[in-house]
Image (cartoon, rainbow, N blue to C red):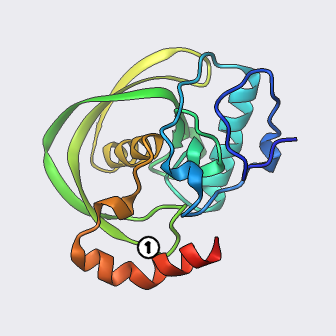
């Protein structure tokens, strides 16, 4: 049986029990790994994506990347509205076409509870990915959805919001970060 605390690259020969997945917290090692591409959309990948959507809603959050559930896979889920019909799965995503200038906004992270950081990101972006049915697609978004895509994409490269902290944010979040590190 798979334990979320033991991350591994995608291996189609090794079964994962999606019901055992849980959100992992900083400073868990998998959060700093560069995630690996998923070679094919299988029933297992679909089940993991479904569980990730469930965890995202339970948290509650607007996005969740596979590394945040202990899997170093290039996959994330997102939902900017909280409505079940707006759940989306992004497998092997690529971002391009940053536009609309940059905007600074506060961001939180399900793997860094209690920590908020002002992050500057392009306000519009294009994403190319594969959905949970194995179909490639491309979409563009601005504002919140564009920010979610960029935040979750950062997770796939091992980048966290704390890496984008200003000195002021670092001071404001020093205690919360220390508590997470000590809880490891």
Residue tagged by mark 1?
A: 115
Q: Position of residue 138 (x, y in %)?
A: 37, 21
- Residue at image position (49%, 26%) is 92
- Residue at image position (39%, 45%) is 154
- Residue at image position (66%, 53%) is 55
Q: Residue furthest left?
A: 101
Vertical comparison of 9 with 1: above or below: above
On the picture, is 71 further left or further right than 118?
Answer: right
How many labels, in total?
1
Vertical comparison of 47 with 120: above or below: above
Instruction: Work out whether residue 118 or residue 9 is closer to the camera in this orientation and state it.
Output: 9
Q: Position of residue 9 (x, y in %)?
A: 64, 32
Q: Position of residue 113 (x, y in %)?
A: 53, 71
Screen quadrant of the N terminus: top right
Quarter of the figure with residue 57 = bottom right
Instruction: Work out whether residue 173 or residue 32 is closer to the camera in this orientation and state it.
Output: 32
- Residue at image position (27%, 48%) is 143
Screen quadrant of the C terminus: bottom right
On the picture, is 62 further left or further right than 159?
Answer: right
Dot 1, crowdedness within 10 Å: few (<14), some or many (≥20)?
Answer: many
């Amino acid at each position: 049986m798979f334990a979320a605390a033991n991350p591994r690259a995608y291996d189609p020969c090794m079964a994962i029990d999606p019901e055992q997945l849980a959100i992992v917290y900083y400073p868990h090692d998998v959060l700093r790994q560069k995630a690996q591409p998923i070679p094919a959309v299988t029933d297992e990948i679909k089940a993991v994506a479904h569980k990730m959507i469930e965890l995202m809603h339970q948290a509650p959050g607007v996005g969740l990347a596979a590394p945040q559930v202990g899997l170093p896979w290039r996959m994330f889920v997102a939902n900017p509205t909280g409505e079940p019909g707006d759940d989306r799965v992004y497998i092997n995503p690529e971002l391009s076409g940053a536009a609309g200038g940059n905007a600074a906004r506060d961001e939180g992270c399900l793997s860094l509870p209690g920590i908020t950081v002002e992050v500057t990101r392009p306000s519009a972006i294009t994403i190319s990915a594969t959905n949970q049915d194995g179909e490639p697609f491309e979409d563009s978004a601005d504002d919140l959805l564009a920010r979610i895509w960029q935040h979750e994409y950062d997770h796939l490269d091992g980048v966290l919001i704390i890496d984008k902290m200003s000195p002021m944010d670092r001071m404001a979040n020093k205690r919360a970060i220390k508590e997470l590190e000590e809880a490891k």
